[in-house]
Amino acid sequence: MAKVKISGIWSGTVEVELDTWTITMLREEVAKQSNYNPNSINFIYAGKILTNGDGQHNLTQLGIKNNAKILATRICVEEGKAIKEEIMAEEERAERLTRVNKSFEGKKKGVVGDGVGFANNDVREAATALAERHADGSLPTQDLNVPLHHHTPQLASGTDQRAIITALMLDANAKHLIKRGMYKEALEVLSIGKEAFSLCDPMAIELINNIPILQINIVWCYFMLQDISSLSEAGERLQMAREGLERAHGNNALRGYYTELALRMRLELLEGVVAYYSGQLDKARAALLSAREKFEKLQVSDEALSLLMSMGFTESDAKRALRMSSQNVGAALDFLIEDRQKKERKQQEEAQRGKEIREQKAYGMTPLNRPVDLLRLNDLVSIGFEKEVAAEALRKNENDFERALDDLTHPETISALQMESRKRKMREEIQDSSIEILVMMGFERSRAVAALQPDRNIYLAMQRLMAEGLGDPNMLREFSASAGPGDIASSSSFSLPHIASVGNVKGPSIPSGELSADTAESDALADYDIEVNIEGEAITEYLSLVESAATGGGEDKQQNDSAQ
């Protein structure tokens, strides 16, 4: 029997079977000792509220060990019921998010042609893995690329975190498809992304503008596919998009730069088209005239463009700056300088985040599959403990600072920690070197990492990769001749050939941890930086149709289009 120390509303020691007892059983025991209703008792351990979950996890699986200290607090029964309902709602949202991911997986399997449709086959897996990785807040927060008016969503739960990252990845993939002109495929991805957004707490994402932009993109796909049958739905989506943009940016949507001008122009064009096919000619004319006014403001003069390009800026960057500064060359120059500084800061931050993630990967995962908490690790290092040994103490003790400190201050446990730390470091060095050998043989780095994952055996990994018909045949024959299975498989620390670049490589990519290229290369203003040639032609065409219909000459055309 193990002992658990309870403090708070009742103080005492409870004898438990860690491998069989659940939180419910512990709560009932404390309720019996304290004469409180079990539903009114709340447990806090290692900074987290302990919940029943699915009832299958025992105390050991929750990280509770002998002599663990648990704080018991009391809540009213009504509050307890509210918490229970909230937990049930959270579990339901998590199940729906799982179905969203499976739905996207099913869509991917239906891809034909060059497979660009669900262009990056790792999108769903990367989104899910990244979201899971950040759900407990231990890893550095990735740049979610949420183009906002300085609003960052406060995600209260792991499901919110997973849902919004999944949605952002899908959204980025859909934008890539739109750029490729693959509007039908983009619509499918956007619909799944919208469902993922719907699983977030509405209060948490109320002020972000990704959702209204997603609605505009859906209607833009309808427009480019000439899908007149979706008119009523398109009108509702555009209304939601307008309301969402006003919440995020205000009614005027001007924030120093004219960043939303192109997006607003597209919104008003689509509103005008929907109004035209709905027979609301006055509304259509007003929307299209407003869109044309914005279109004219977005035209860039050759003189201003040449001046900025002569200063060393690219044509695309110069055009963007002029469009977003209402053709003011001075303001455009300020924008370009500020944008360059932001990109430099972002690169530095991403490099630091990447360094921290690789560092955490090197320390390994806790028994509950969580990364080592770097903040607590730095606290231990600041009081004089060796970093690798302190990391091993936190890893072993589920990031519990007090228990890690106890292990680090007892001679009999610190020696074991030092030994395990050295073993882990040696294994990581062998793993990294093995990956480099496989890369030199012509295998892709990501495949090499995956092949080594099951048993860290380079020879078996090579066999797996060769079975897929990958790699450089000459390099494979040379390696096989110099090192057979007896030289490698029988030893966990075999001698490796010298590789000059091993010390300089960044190391293997984090499995499923890198964002898709669509998301990684996107920037926060990309949604507002639209090439407006198609929009300009459409504005002219539909203004002509509206005027023709108003004079009676376009009624047949309008009716025929609506029938189609």
Image: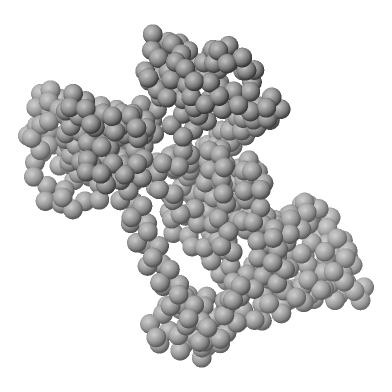
Task: In the rendered view, tell whether residue 99 sits above or below residue 287.
Answer: above
Image x and y of residue 333, in percent: 47, 83
Visible residue check, residue 365: no
Residue 536 sits in quarter: bottom right
Q: Position of residue 438 (x, y in %)?
A: 21, 40
Q: Farthest residue to the right: give it.
A: 552
Residue at image position (58%, 33%) is: 94
Residue closest to the far bottom: 303
Q: Seen in the image, is 41 located left or right of residue 139?
A: right
Question: In the rendered image, which quarter is residue 556 located in?
Answer: bottom right
Q: How many marks?
A: 0
Query: At x 40% / y 44%, what residue is drawn?
Result: 139
Where residue 454 sits: x, y (%)? 29, 27
Seen at 62% across and 50% down, the residue is 205
The answer to whether residue 128 is left or right of residue 538 is: left
Give the camera-side residue of 312 and 80: 80
438, above or below 321, in the image: above
Q: Residue furthest top?
A: 1
Above or below residue 502? Residue 108 is above
Q: How is the protein colored in the picture?
A: one colour
**Left or right: 13 as drawn, with respect to 324:** left
